[in-house]
Amino acid sequence: MSLRAALVHSLILEIYIICLFIILVVGPLLAQDVLRITLKTLAVMLAAAIAHWCLNRGLLRLAGIFLITFAWLKVAESIFNSWGPLSPQLVLMPVLVAMAAFILGTRAALIFAFASLLFGAAMVIFQPNEAAMARPWPPPPHVVVVALAIGLACLIWPLSVMFGTLRATLSQLKVSETRFRSLATGAHVVSAVIDANGVFLLSEGLALARLGLKPGEVVGRSVFDAYSDYPEILDIIRAGLRGESHRTEIALMDAWFDSLFLPQFDARGHITELFIVSTDITERKRAEAEREKLAGRLRQGQVLESVGRLAGGVAHDLNNMLTPILGFAEMLREEFPAGDPRAAQLGHIHSAAKRARQITTQLLAFARRQPTDMRIHDLNTILGDFDPMLRRAVREDIRLVSHLHRAPLFILCDVLEIERILLNL
Protein backbone atom coordinates (compact mmCIF):
# COMPACT_ATOMS: atom_id res chain seq x y z
CA MET A 1 0.00 0.00 0.00
CA SER A 2 1.29 3.45 -0.93
CA LEU A 3 1.71 6.28 1.55
CA ARG A 4 -1.29 8.16 0.17
CA ALA A 5 -3.51 5.09 0.25
CA ALA A 6 -2.42 4.36 3.82
CA LEU A 7 -3.30 7.92 4.86
CA VAL A 8 -6.76 7.77 3.25
CA HIS A 9 -7.40 4.36 4.80
CA SER A 10 -6.41 5.59 8.26
CA LEU A 11 -8.64 8.67 7.92
CA ILE A 12 -11.61 6.50 6.98
CA LEU A 13 -11.07 4.22 9.98
CA GLU A 14 -10.64 7.28 12.17
CA ILE A 15 -13.93 8.71 10.97
CA TYR A 16 -15.66 5.44 11.82
CA ILE A 17 -14.28 5.48 15.36
CA ILE A 18 -15.05 9.19 15.93
CA CYS A 19 -18.59 8.78 14.64
CA LEU A 20 -19.20 5.82 16.93
CA PHE A 21 -17.71 7.82 19.81
CA ILE A 22 -20.07 10.72 19.09
CA ILE A 23 -23.13 8.47 18.81
CA LEU A 24 -22.39 6.42 21.93
CA VAL A 25 -20.74 9.00 24.24
CA VAL A 26 -20.96 12.62 23.11
CA GLY A 27 -24.63 12.58 22.14
CA PRO A 28 -25.89 11.31 25.50
CA LEU A 29 -23.58 13.75 27.35
CA LEU A 30 -24.99 16.74 25.53
CA ALA A 31 -28.52 15.42 26.20
CA GLN A 32 -30.01 17.66 23.52
CA ASP A 33 -30.74 17.15 19.86
CA VAL A 34 -29.56 13.57 20.13
CA LEU A 35 -31.50 12.55 17.03
CA ARG A 36 -30.06 15.38 14.93
CA ILE A 37 -26.50 14.61 16.06
CA THR A 38 -26.99 10.90 15.37
CA LEU A 39 -28.34 11.50 11.86
CA LYS A 40 -25.49 13.85 10.99
CA THR A 41 -22.98 11.37 12.34
CA LEU A 42 -24.53 8.54 10.33
CA ALA A 43 -24.29 10.73 7.22
CA VAL A 44 -20.58 11.18 7.88
CA MET A 45 -20.18 7.41 8.31
CA LEU A 46 -22.01 6.87 5.02
CA ALA A 47 -19.60 9.25 3.27
CA ALA A 48 -16.65 7.40 4.81
CA ALA A 49 -18.14 4.09 3.65
CA ILE A 50 -18.41 5.40 0.07
CA ALA A 51 -14.78 6.57 0.21
CA HIS A 52 -13.79 3.16 1.61
CA TRP A 53 -15.58 1.44 -1.27
CA CYS A 54 -13.73 3.61 -3.80
CA LEU A 55 -10.41 2.86 -2.09
CA ASN A 56 -11.00 -0.90 -2.20
CA ARG A 57 -11.69 -0.63 -5.95
CA GLY A 58 -8.34 1.07 -6.49
CA LEU A 59 -9.93 4.50 -7.02
CA LEU A 60 -7.58 6.31 -4.65
CA ARG A 61 -7.99 9.76 -6.19
CA LEU A 62 -11.80 9.52 -6.25
CA ALA A 63 -11.82 8.35 -2.63
CA GLY A 64 -9.57 11.26 -1.64
CA ILE A 65 -11.71 13.81 -3.49
CA PHE A 66 -14.92 12.51 -1.92
CA LEU A 67 -13.45 12.26 1.58
CA ILE A 68 -11.74 15.69 1.69
CA THR A 69 -14.66 17.48 0.01
CA PHE A 70 -17.17 16.02 2.47
CA ALA A 71 -14.87 16.80 5.40
CA TRP A 72 -14.46 20.40 4.20
CA LEU A 73 -18.23 20.85 3.93
CA LYS A 74 -18.78 19.43 7.43
CA VAL A 75 -16.11 21.71 8.90
CA ALA A 76 -17.66 24.72 7.12
CA GLU A 77 -21.08 23.79 8.49
CA SER A 78 -19.65 23.39 11.99
CA ILE A 79 -17.97 26.81 11.80
CA PHE A 80 -21.15 28.45 10.54
CA ASN A 81 -23.27 26.86 13.27
CA SER A 82 -20.84 27.58 16.13
CA TRP A 83 -18.88 30.77 16.76
CA GLY A 84 -18.27 31.85 13.17
CA PRO A 85 -14.90 33.57 12.74
CA LEU A 86 -14.08 32.78 16.37
CA SER A 87 -14.72 29.06 15.94
CA PRO A 88 -11.77 26.78 16.81
CA GLN A 89 -12.76 24.57 13.86
CA LEU A 90 -11.08 27.13 11.59
CA VAL A 91 -7.81 25.36 12.43
CA LEU A 92 -9.05 22.33 10.47
CA MET A 93 -9.20 24.31 7.21
CA PRO A 94 -5.40 24.47 6.64
CA VAL A 95 -5.17 20.84 7.79
CA LEU A 96 -7.60 19.84 5.03
CA VAL A 97 -5.67 21.95 2.52
CA ALA A 98 -2.44 20.16 3.49
CA MET A 99 -4.15 16.77 3.19
CA ALA A 100 -5.47 17.75 -0.25
CA ALA A 101 -1.95 18.70 -1.33
CA PHE A 102 -0.55 15.38 -0.15
CA ILE A 103 -3.32 13.12 -1.49
CA LEU A 104 -4.62 14.98 -4.56
CA GLY A 105 -1.80 17.29 -5.57
CA THR A 106 -1.00 21.00 -5.76
CA ARG A 107 -3.93 21.96 -7.97
CA ALA A 108 -6.49 20.43 -5.60
CA ALA A 109 -4.78 22.10 -2.62
CA LEU A 110 -5.06 25.50 -4.34
CA ILE A 111 -8.76 24.91 -4.99
CA PHE A 112 -9.46 24.02 -1.34
CA ALA A 113 -7.32 26.93 -0.12
CA PHE A 114 -9.22 29.39 -2.34
CA ALA A 115 -12.54 27.96 -1.17
CA SER A 116 -11.42 28.29 2.48
CA LEU A 117 -10.43 31.94 1.93
CA LEU A 118 -13.78 32.70 0.32
CA PHE A 119 -15.62 31.01 3.16
CA GLY A 120 -13.62 32.91 5.79
CA ALA A 121 -14.23 36.23 4.03
CA ALA A 122 -17.95 35.46 3.83
CA MET A 123 -18.02 34.68 7.56
CA VAL A 124 -16.40 38.05 8.31
CA ILE A 125 -18.42 40.15 5.86
CA PHE A 126 -21.85 38.67 6.29
CA GLN A 127 -23.73 38.37 9.56
CA PRO A 128 -22.98 35.00 11.16
CA ASN A 129 -25.55 32.84 12.85
CA GLU A 130 -26.64 35.01 15.81
CA ALA A 131 -27.86 32.01 17.74
CA ALA A 132 -24.48 30.40 17.35
CA MET A 133 -22.66 33.59 18.30
CA ALA A 134 -24.82 33.85 21.41
CA ARG A 135 -23.31 30.66 22.76
CA PRO A 136 -20.98 31.20 25.70
CA TRP A 137 -17.27 31.62 24.95
CA PRO A 138 -15.22 29.77 25.81
CA PRO A 139 -17.30 26.59 25.41
CA PRO A 140 -18.03 24.30 28.36
CA PRO A 141 -15.10 22.25 29.71
CA HIS A 142 -16.52 18.89 28.65
CA VAL A 143 -16.88 20.19 25.07
CA VAL A 144 -13.27 21.40 25.13
CA VAL A 145 -12.07 18.02 26.42
CA VAL A 146 -13.99 16.13 23.76
CA ALA A 147 -12.76 18.52 21.05
CA LEU A 148 -9.15 18.17 22.20
CA ALA A 149 -9.43 14.37 22.31
CA ILE A 150 -10.88 14.27 18.82
CA GLY A 151 -8.26 16.72 17.55
CA LEU A 152 -5.39 14.74 19.03
CA ALA A 153 -6.78 11.54 17.56
CA CYS A 154 -7.06 13.25 14.19
CA LEU A 155 -3.38 14.17 14.38
CA ILE A 156 -1.78 11.19 16.09
CA TRP A 157 -3.32 8.32 14.17
CA PRO A 158 -2.71 9.56 10.62
CA LEU A 159 0.79 10.66 11.56
CA SER A 160 1.57 7.27 13.07
CA VAL A 161 0.22 5.51 9.98
CA MET A 162 2.17 7.85 7.72
CA PHE A 163 5.42 7.36 9.61
CA GLY A 164 4.92 3.59 9.75
CA THR A 165 4.24 3.40 6.03
CA LEU A 166 7.15 5.74 5.37
CA ARG A 167 9.51 3.54 7.39
CA ALA A 168 8.32 0.45 5.53
CA THR A 169 8.74 2.24 2.20
CA LEU A 170 12.24 3.40 3.10
CA SER A 171 13.15 -0.13 4.18
CA GLN A 172 11.90 -1.52 0.87
CA LEU A 173 13.78 1.17 -1.02
CA LYS A 174 16.96 0.29 0.85
CA VAL A 175 16.54 -3.39 0.03
CA SER A 176 15.85 -2.55 -3.63
CA GLU A 177 18.88 -0.27 -3.75
CA THR A 178 21.06 -3.00 -2.25
CA ARG A 179 19.82 -5.52 -4.80
CA PHE A 180 20.31 -3.12 -7.68
CA ARG A 181 23.80 -2.16 -6.53
CA SER A 182 24.76 -5.83 -6.10
CA LEU A 183 23.47 -6.55 -9.59
CA ALA A 184 25.17 -3.50 -11.09
CA THR A 185 28.53 -4.11 -9.43
CA GLY A 186 28.59 -7.91 -9.64
CA ALA A 187 27.45 -8.51 -13.22
CA HIS A 188 29.83 -8.42 -16.17
CA VAL A 189 28.13 -5.32 -17.56
CA VAL A 190 28.52 -1.55 -17.47
CA SER A 191 25.63 0.25 -15.74
CA ALA A 192 25.63 4.02 -16.14
CA VAL A 193 23.23 6.88 -15.48
CA ILE A 194 23.69 10.37 -16.90
CA ASP A 195 21.57 13.44 -16.24
CA ALA A 196 19.89 15.69 -18.81
CA ASN A 197 23.15 17.63 -19.25
CA GLY A 198 25.20 14.51 -19.99
CA VAL A 199 26.97 14.31 -16.61
CA PHE A 200 27.61 10.85 -15.17
CA LEU A 201 25.61 10.12 -12.02
CA LEU A 202 26.46 6.40 -11.84
CA SER A 203 29.13 4.17 -13.33
CA GLU A 204 29.31 0.58 -12.07
CA GLY A 205 30.02 -2.93 -13.34
CA LEU A 206 32.82 -5.44 -13.75
CA ALA A 207 33.01 -4.76 -17.50
CA LEU A 208 34.50 -1.33 -16.77
CA ALA A 209 37.84 -3.13 -16.54
CA ARG A 210 37.63 -3.67 -20.32
CA LEU A 211 37.82 0.10 -20.71
CA GLY A 212 40.56 0.58 -18.14
CA LEU A 213 38.15 2.26 -15.70
CA LYS A 214 37.18 1.72 -12.09
CA PRO A 215 33.61 1.85 -10.71
CA GLY A 216 32.61 5.45 -10.10
CA GLU A 217 35.72 6.87 -11.76
CA VAL A 218 33.81 8.96 -14.33
CA VAL A 219 31.04 10.11 -11.97
CA GLY A 220 30.77 13.90 -12.18
CA ARG A 221 32.39 14.07 -15.61
CA SER A 222 30.60 14.95 -18.83
CA VAL A 223 30.01 12.08 -21.22
CA PHE A 224 30.88 14.45 -24.07
CA ASP A 225 34.37 14.91 -22.59
CA ALA A 226 34.92 11.28 -21.62
CA TYR A 227 33.99 9.93 -25.08
CA SER A 228 34.98 12.83 -27.31
CA ASP A 229 36.96 10.41 -29.52
CA TYR A 230 33.85 8.35 -30.28
CA PRO A 231 31.39 10.60 -32.15
CA GLU A 232 29.11 7.70 -33.09
CA ILE A 233 28.53 6.96 -29.38
CA LEU A 234 27.86 10.63 -28.63
CA ASP A 235 25.27 10.71 -31.43
CA ILE A 236 23.40 7.82 -29.79
CA ILE A 237 23.58 9.53 -26.39
CA ARG A 238 22.25 12.79 -27.86
CA ALA A 239 19.36 10.84 -29.36
CA GLY A 240 18.70 9.26 -25.95
CA LEU A 241 18.68 12.69 -24.30
CA ARG A 242 16.07 13.70 -26.88
CA GLY A 243 13.86 10.86 -25.65
CA GLU A 244 14.76 8.09 -28.12
CA SER A 245 15.42 4.54 -26.90
CA HIS A 246 18.20 2.63 -28.62
CA ARG A 247 19.78 -0.81 -28.57
CA THR A 248 22.93 -1.30 -30.58
CA GLU A 249 26.32 -3.00 -30.59
CA ILE A 250 29.23 -0.66 -29.93
CA ALA A 251 32.94 -1.19 -30.53
CA LEU A 252 34.88 0.65 -27.84
CA MET A 253 38.67 0.34 -27.69
CA ASP A 254 39.31 -3.41 -28.02
CA ALA A 255 35.93 -4.44 -26.62
CA TRP A 256 32.41 -4.96 -27.93
CA PHE A 257 29.25 -4.06 -25.98
CA ASP A 258 25.56 -4.72 -26.52
CA SER A 259 24.21 -1.40 -25.21
CA LEU A 260 20.68 -0.38 -24.24
CA PHE A 261 19.83 3.34 -23.86
CA LEU A 262 16.64 4.09 -21.89
CA PRO A 263 15.58 7.74 -21.29
CA GLN A 264 13.66 8.58 -18.11
CA PHE A 265 10.93 11.24 -17.99
CA ASP A 266 9.30 13.32 -15.27
CA ALA A 267 5.57 13.94 -14.88
CA ARG A 268 5.67 16.69 -17.52
CA GLY A 269 7.42 14.51 -20.08
CA HIS A 270 10.84 16.16 -19.73
CA ILE A 271 14.02 14.09 -19.86
CA THR A 272 15.54 13.69 -16.40
CA GLU A 273 18.09 10.88 -16.82
CA LEU A 274 19.40 8.40 -19.35
CA PHE A 275 19.98 4.80 -18.24
CA ILE A 276 22.70 2.90 -20.08
CA VAL A 277 23.18 -0.86 -19.65
CA SER A 278 26.03 -2.35 -21.72
CA THR A 279 26.73 -6.09 -21.78
CA ASP A 280 30.27 -7.19 -22.61
CA ILE A 281 30.06 -9.34 -25.77
CA THR A 282 33.76 -9.23 -26.66
CA GLU A 283 34.26 -12.98 -26.27
CA ARG A 284 31.14 -13.68 -28.31
CA LYS A 285 32.39 -11.42 -31.10
CA ARG A 286 35.76 -13.14 -31.07
CA ALA A 287 34.09 -16.54 -31.20
CA GLU A 288 31.92 -15.40 -34.12
CA ALA A 289 34.99 -14.10 -35.98
CA GLU A 290 36.85 -17.36 -35.36
CA ARG A 291 33.82 -19.36 -36.46
CA GLU A 292 33.58 -17.30 -39.64
CA LYS A 293 37.27 -17.82 -40.26
CA LEU A 294 36.92 -21.58 -39.82
CA ALA A 295 33.87 -21.58 -42.07
CA GLY A 296 35.93 -19.77 -44.73
CA ARG A 297 38.66 -22.35 -44.42
CA LEU A 298 36.10 -25.12 -44.69
CA ARG A 299 34.62 -23.59 -47.82
CA GLN A 300 38.10 -23.18 -49.29
CA GLY A 301 38.91 -26.79 -48.41
CA GLN A 302 35.72 -27.98 -50.07
CA VAL A 303 36.59 -26.00 -53.19
CA LEU A 304 40.11 -27.43 -53.20
CA GLU A 305 38.70 -30.93 -52.75
CA SER A 306 36.37 -30.45 -55.71
CA VAL A 307 39.18 -29.04 -57.83
CA GLY A 308 41.39 -31.92 -56.72
CA ARG A 309 38.85 -34.50 -57.82
CA LEU A 310 38.53 -32.77 -61.17
CA ALA A 311 42.30 -32.46 -61.53
CA GLY A 312 42.78 -36.11 -60.60
CA GLY A 313 40.35 -37.24 -63.26
CA VAL A 314 41.94 -35.03 -65.90
CA ALA A 315 45.46 -36.16 -64.91
CA HIS A 316 44.45 -39.81 -65.01
CA ASP A 317 42.97 -39.49 -68.49
CA LEU A 318 45.93 -37.43 -69.70
CA ASN A 319 48.38 -39.95 -68.26
CA ASN A 320 46.61 -42.74 -70.15
CA MET A 321 47.10 -40.80 -73.38
CA LEU A 322 50.75 -39.99 -72.62
CA THR A 323 51.71 -43.64 -72.05
CA PRO A 324 51.46 -44.72 -75.73
CA ILE A 325 53.05 -41.46 -76.87
CA LEU A 326 56.11 -42.12 -74.70
CA GLY A 327 56.26 -45.77 -75.71
CA PHE A 328 55.95 -45.25 -79.47
CA ALA A 329 58.37 -42.30 -79.41
CA GLU A 330 60.97 -44.45 -77.63
CA MET A 331 60.47 -47.36 -80.06
CA LEU A 332 60.73 -45.16 -83.14
CA ARG A 333 63.83 -43.38 -81.87
CA GLU A 334 65.63 -46.73 -81.46
CA GLU A 335 64.98 -47.59 -85.13
CA PHE A 336 66.92 -44.59 -86.43
CA PRO A 337 70.72 -44.21 -86.25
CA ALA A 338 72.29 -41.81 -83.80
CA GLY A 339 72.95 -39.02 -86.28
CA ASP A 340 69.58 -39.15 -87.98
CA PRO A 341 67.69 -35.82 -87.51
CA ARG A 342 64.44 -37.77 -87.19
CA ALA A 343 65.81 -39.43 -84.06
CA ALA A 344 66.45 -35.96 -82.59
CA GLN A 345 62.87 -34.91 -83.39
CA LEU A 346 61.54 -38.04 -81.72
CA GLY A 347 63.72 -37.17 -78.71
CA HIS A 348 61.99 -33.79 -78.47
CA ILE A 349 58.60 -35.54 -78.59
CA HIS A 350 59.72 -37.95 -75.87
CA SER A 351 61.01 -35.10 -73.66
CA ALA A 352 57.79 -33.08 -74.05
CA ALA A 353 55.72 -36.13 -73.16
CA LYS A 354 57.85 -36.71 -70.05
CA ARG A 355 57.30 -33.11 -68.98
CA ALA A 356 53.58 -33.57 -69.51
CA ARG A 357 53.72 -36.72 -67.37
CA GLN A 358 55.42 -34.73 -64.60
CA ILE A 359 52.54 -32.28 -64.72
CA THR A 360 50.03 -35.13 -64.46
CA THR A 361 52.03 -36.52 -61.55
CA GLN A 362 51.75 -33.16 -59.80
CA LEU A 363 48.02 -33.06 -60.53
CA LEU A 364 47.65 -36.53 -59.05
CA ALA A 365 49.56 -35.34 -55.99
CA PHE A 366 47.15 -32.43 -55.74
CA ALA A 367 44.26 -34.88 -55.99
CA ARG A 368 45.96 -37.24 -53.46
CA ARG A 369 45.68 -40.24 -55.77
CA GLN A 370 49.37 -41.16 -55.92
CA PRO A 371 50.71 -44.00 -53.68
CA THR A 372 53.36 -43.18 -51.06
CA ASP A 373 56.99 -43.42 -52.27
CA MET A 374 59.41 -42.73 -49.39
CA ARG A 375 62.92 -41.76 -50.60
CA ILE A 376 65.73 -39.36 -49.65
CA HIS A 377 65.33 -36.04 -51.47
CA ASP A 378 66.75 -32.54 -51.33
CA LEU A 379 64.04 -30.21 -50.02
CA ASN A 380 65.45 -27.31 -52.06
CA THR A 381 65.13 -29.38 -55.25
CA ILE A 382 61.53 -30.36 -54.45
CA LEU A 383 60.54 -26.76 -53.85
CA GLY A 384 62.35 -25.53 -56.96
CA ASP A 385 60.69 -28.13 -59.18
CA PHE A 386 57.25 -27.53 -57.68
CA ASP A 387 57.48 -23.73 -57.76
CA PRO A 388 55.81 -23.29 -61.20
CA MET A 389 52.89 -25.53 -60.22
CA LEU A 390 52.56 -23.74 -56.91
CA ARG A 391 52.39 -20.33 -58.58
CA ARG A 392 49.57 -21.49 -60.80
CA ALA A 393 47.62 -22.74 -57.76
CA VAL A 394 47.54 -19.42 -55.86
CA ARG A 395 45.39 -16.39 -56.67
CA GLU A 396 46.70 -13.56 -58.80
CA ASP A 397 46.58 -11.11 -55.89
CA ILE A 398 49.00 -13.28 -53.86
CA ARG A 399 52.74 -12.82 -54.40
CA LEU A 400 54.77 -16.00 -53.84
CA VAL A 401 58.42 -15.63 -52.75
CA SER A 402 60.72 -18.64 -52.20
CA HIS A 403 63.81 -18.47 -49.97
CA LEU A 404 65.87 -21.66 -50.41
CA HIS A 405 68.59 -22.80 -48.06
CA ARG A 406 72.14 -22.43 -49.35
CA ALA A 407 73.12 -26.00 -48.49
CA PRO A 408 71.13 -29.07 -49.57
CA LEU A 409 68.47 -30.24 -47.08
CA PHE A 410 68.14 -34.00 -47.43
CA ILE A 411 65.04 -35.60 -45.92
CA LEU A 412 63.26 -38.94 -46.15
CA CYS A 413 59.90 -38.19 -47.69
CA ASP A 414 57.39 -38.75 -50.40
CA VAL A 415 57.76 -35.94 -52.90
CA LEU A 416 54.05 -35.90 -53.63
CA GLU A 417 53.22 -35.52 -49.92
CA ILE A 418 55.65 -32.60 -49.60
CA GLU A 419 54.04 -30.98 -52.63
CA ARG A 420 50.59 -31.54 -51.09
CA ILE A 421 51.78 -29.84 -47.88
CA LEU A 422 53.06 -26.90 -49.90
CA LEU A 423 49.69 -26.61 -51.63
CA ASN A 424 47.85 -26.61 -48.30
CA LEU A 425 50.11 -23.88 -46.98
Image: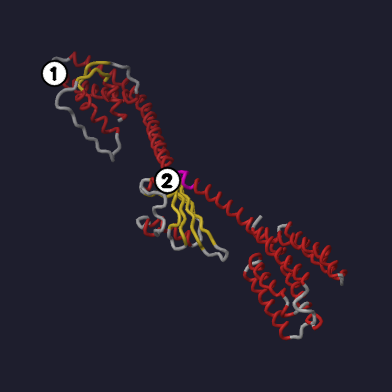
Looking at the image, is 42 positioned above or below residue 349?
below
Q: In this picture, is 105 found above or below 246?
A: below
Mark 2 or 1: the one toward you? 2
The image quarter in which residue 155 lies? bottom right
Circle 1 sits in a helix, a strand or a loop, which is it?
loop
In the displayed structure image, the side of residue 70 where residue 301 appears, left or right: left
| x and y percentages locating residue 38 in the rendered image | 85, 67
Residue 185, magenta (yes or no): yes
Please state, as top left, top right, bottom left or bottom right, where the C terminus lies in the image: top left
Q: Is 309 left or right of 327, judged from the image as shown?
A: right
Tell me the kind of residue under disc 1. Asp
- Residue range of the region highlighted in magenta in the rendering: 183-188
Judge from the rendering whether residue 337 lies leftward or rightward of residue 390; answer left or right: left
C-alpha gap between disc 2 and disc 1: 87 Å
Q: Amino acid at mark 2?
A: Ala
Instruction: Tell me the residue that label 2 is attached to.
Output: 207
Which mark, residue 340?
Answer: 1
Eyeballing the image, is 384 above or below 273? above
**SS category of the residue bearing label 2:** helix
Q: Residue at x 67, y 70 (%)?
A: 95
The residue nearer to you, when weighing 331 against 162, is: 162
Could you tell me residue 157's position as x and y percent?
69, 60
Is residue 255 toward the left or the right of residue 158 in the image? left
Q: Position of residue 211 (x, y in %)?
A: 37, 48
Q: Farthest left residue?
A: 339
The quarter holding residue 328 reads top left
Q: Nearer the viewer, residue 11 or 369?
A: 11
Is residue 261 in the magenta section? no
Residue at (74%, 66%) from the top-left corner?
A: 66
